Image: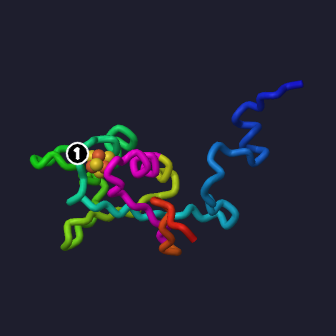
Amino acid sequence: MLLYKPFGARRKAGMTRNLKYDRGQAGGMAKKYKIVYDRRNCISAGVCVVMAPEYWVMDAPDGLADINPDKKPTTRDDGWQELVIDEKHLDENLQAAQGCPAQVIFIYELESGKQIYPKKEE
Ligand code: SF4
């Protein structure tokens, strides 16, 4: 008996790799998420840049991370940065948020406003 199913077969069978999040595939619409970043409390550890190099950079003279300016994030008056991302870029940014030792990266479902990281007690 074949115990290991190739990825294509697993996908066909609905056995995708990451079932933690509702992918919104039933309605055919990809979800959007919002990254909200408390830059003032970044400690320059650089994990975000390693986990999601397309989305995080550390080019600023103060040594703190920024959401990649090429992605056109908004900067609030209080210095926090925000960026809406497509569902397909959620995993890498979740890894950045989870790996951030200062826990200054928050991720929300855009439509519902639900905070998905850090996970809130219900
Ligand atoms: S992982 Fe967190 S603390 Fe480290 S550079 Fe990125 S935002 Fe700053």
Q: Is 80 covered by the magenta stretch? A: no
Above or below, comparing residue 122 to residue 41 in the picture: below
User: Between residues 101 and 71, which one lies in front from this camera angle?
Assistant: 101
Q: What element carries label 1?
A: loop
Quarter of the image with the C terminus is bottom right
Q: Which of 112 and 105 is in front in this view?
A: 105
Q: Residue 18 location in percent, x, y?
A: 62, 47
Q: Is residue 105 above or below residue 78?
A: above
Q: What residue type is labelled 1?
A: Ser
Q: Residue at the location (50% across, 48% down)?
A: 91
> Can you tell me whether the CB of the residue at mark 1 lies under 8 Å from the nearest atom of ligand 1?
yes
User: Where does residue 83 sit, x and y in percent of width and height?
Assistant: 35, 62
Picture coordinates of residue 64 (x, y %)? 19, 49
Name the outermost residue toward the top.
1
Q: Position of residue 93 (x, y in %)?
A: 42, 50
Left or right? Give the position of 27 relative to 76: right
Identify the magenta region: 92-110
Residue 56 shows in this picture: no
User: Is 59 displayed left or right of 48 in the figure?
Assistant: left
